Structures are given as structure tokens and as C-alpha cells.
């Protein structure tokens, strides 16, 4: 699919079918995340693939936003392996994990999968519930799968502000 078409057609799926994600498609999504650029090439991301019913139940306890997806990618990063920017107030962890997640989200659409970026959860509680390493922070969850029958984007999905309201040339 042409990239412009892909980014125009992709939407956050809020209801998934029970059709499983093929391993080949999942591998393509994970590989796209691996190729994402990171500051100083630190590659501080760690992706956890949740597909077991007991793991998905833990995620369901943390958020109402799994929407029935049979695969959830937990996108985390190692706080001990980040680049701290001048001034010391920001580091590369969140931005690098976000770039990785965005690569995977777009790769999912390219592979014919639907997805939804989820931030509606307490990352510290979910880190503990999933028994992840203490040095890792969860940035987001990425629901993956196939949309349920008759699922469409939310009504306001295609509404976009004009560039004149969001871009300023300096």
C-alpha cells in the first residue's frame, strides 16, 4: 500500500475480532520496531508480546481499552540506558519508545492488521502486575488484531485542522 494511503486509512480500532494475528505479521511488526531510530542508537526499548489469556487478563485489570485484541504489545524502555539531553531535564526513553511504537503501529497497518495505541493505565502498577524489571518503564500498550465486523473509525477521526493552524514557519 502507498504510504500516504496507509496513514490516511489507518484508525484506532476499538473492537477486535477473535481472529489470531499470524506469526509472520507479528514478526514484521516487531522487526519494524527494531529498525526504529533511537538516540545514540541505544535501543533502550523492550517489547513484551502479550497473547496468553492469563497475561491479557492482567492487562484487562489495568485498562478497559484492550477492546478484545488477542495480541497486545507492551512497549517499555530501560531507564538505565537512556541519553540525557543538555539541561538534564529530558532523556531519550519516552521519545525513543514512542518512535518504536509508531513504527510498529504503521507496520501493523501495512500488514493488514488493525491497532490501537493505549495510554489509559497506570504504568507503575502494570509494570508490577506483569513482573517486569524495576528499571523499565512502560510507555504504552499497542492492541493488535483484526477489526470486528462493521467496525469503522470514530466519527471525528477524519477531521483535521488545517496546516495553517498547526504549522508556523519561523
Image: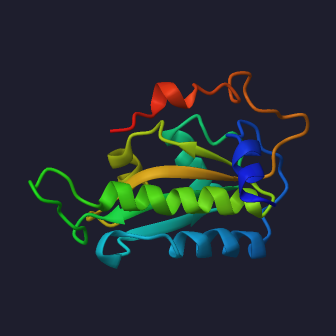
- Relative placement, left or right, of 54 versus 80 is right
Quadrant in which the N terminus is drawn? bottom right
Q: Residue furthest top?
A: 155
Q: Residue 90, relative to residue 167: is it above or below?
A: below
Q: Residue 96 placed where, x, y %?
A: 38, 62
Q: Residue 41, relative to residue 125: is it above or below?
A: below
| 67 or 52: nearer the viewer | 67
- Relative placement, left or right, of 10 versus 169 is right
| Residue at x-position 38% and y-position 40% | 122
**Residue 126 in view (yes/no):** yes
Q: Residue 95 placed where, x, y %?
A: 36, 56
Q: Residue furthest left?
A: 87
| 64 or 30: nearer the viewer | 30
Quadrant in which the C terminus is drawn? top left
Q: How many marks?
A: 0
| Residue at x-position 36% and y-position 64% | 77
| Residue at x-position 69% and y-position 39% | 67
Q: Residue 14 placed where, x, y %?
A: 71, 36
Q: Residue 20 placed where, x, y %?
A: 81, 60
**Residue 52 in view (yes/no):** no
Q: Residue 145 lies in what quarter of the image?
A: bottom right
Q: Residue 48, relative to residue 118: is it above or below?
A: below
| 150 or 7: nearer the viewer | 7
Q: Colour scheme in the image? A: rainbow
Q: Residue 4, relative to residue 43: is it above or below?
A: above
Q: Residue furthest right?
A: 149
Amino acid at each position: 500500500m502507498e504510504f500516504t494511503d496507509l496513514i490516511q486509512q489507518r484508525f484506532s480500532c476499538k473492537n477486535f475480532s477473535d481472529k489470531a494475528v499470524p506469526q509472520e505479521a507479528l514478526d514484521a511488526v516487531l522487526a519494524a520496531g527494531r529498525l526504529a531510530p533511537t538516540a545514540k542508537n541505544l535501543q533502550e526499548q523492550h517489547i513484551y508480546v502479550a497473547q496468553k489469556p492469563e497475561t491479557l487478563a492482567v492487562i484487562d485489570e489495568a485498562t478497559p481499552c484492550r477492546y478484545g485484541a488477542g495480541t497486545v504489545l507492551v512497549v517499555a524502555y530501560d531507564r538505565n540506558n537512556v541519553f540525557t539531553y543538555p539541561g538534564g531535564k529530558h532523556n531519550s526513553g519516552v521519545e525513543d519508545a514512542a518512535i518504536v511504537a509508531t513504527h510498529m503501529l504503521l507496520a501493523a497497518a501495512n500488514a493488514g492488521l488493525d491497532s490501537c495505541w493505549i495510554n489509559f493505565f497506570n504504568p507503575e502498577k502494570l509494570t508490577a502486575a506483569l513482573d517486569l524489571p524495576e528499571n523499565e518503564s512502560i510507555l504504552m500498550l499497542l492492541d493488535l488484531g483484526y477489526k470486528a465486523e462493521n467496525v469503522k473509525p470514530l466519527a471525528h477521526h477524519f477531521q483535521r485542522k488545517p496546516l495553517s493552524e498547526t504549522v508556523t514557519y519561523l
